[in-house]
Amino acid sequence: ELDRREFVGTIEQLEQRRDTPLLLVCNSGRRSLIAAHLLRGIGYPQAYSVQGGMHALLHEMA
């Protein structure tokens, strides 16, 4: 489960330019999709989630 409040608080502490592309990945892609949506909602328009997460990446690389 993604703790949204903690996640947003941590992101806001970073000195990341808001126009920098951010690629998010988790195990299945569900949490990273939520995180990317949250980031876009707070002004990071180039936040992206890897569809299918690490499972999909590893399958694609095999």
Image: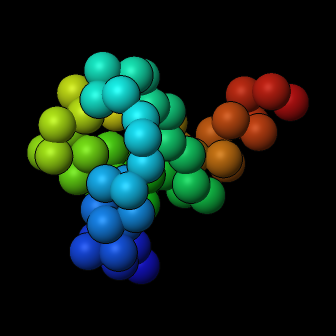
Left or right, 35 with reference to 5: right
Instruction: Residue at 29%, 29% (x, y): give it.
Output: 18
Q: How many marks?
A: 0
Instruction: Residue at 42%, 22% (x, y): give it.
Output: 21
* Residue toward you, 29 or 60: 29
Q: Is residue 37 visible?
A: no
Instruction: Residue at 26%, 45% (x, y): give it.
Output: 39
Q: Quadrant of residue 17?
A: top left
Relative to 3, say whether 51 is above or below: above
* Residue toward you, 12 or 33: 12
Relative to 16, say whether 27 is above or below: below
* The C terminus, quarter of image: top right
Q: Is residue 43 visible?
A: yes
Instruction: Residue at 26%, 74% (x, y): give it.
Output: 5
Left or right, 37 with reference to 31: left
User: Of all residues shown, which one is farthest toward the right?
Assistant: 62
Left or right, 37 with reference to 25: left
Relative to 7, say whether 26 is above or below: above
Residue 10 percent across, percent down from the top left: 40, 63
Q: Quadrant of residue 1?
A: bottom left
Residue 45 percent across, percent down from the top left: 22, 27
Residue 12 percent across, percent down from the top left: 31, 54
- Asked which colour scheme the image uses, the reply is rainbow
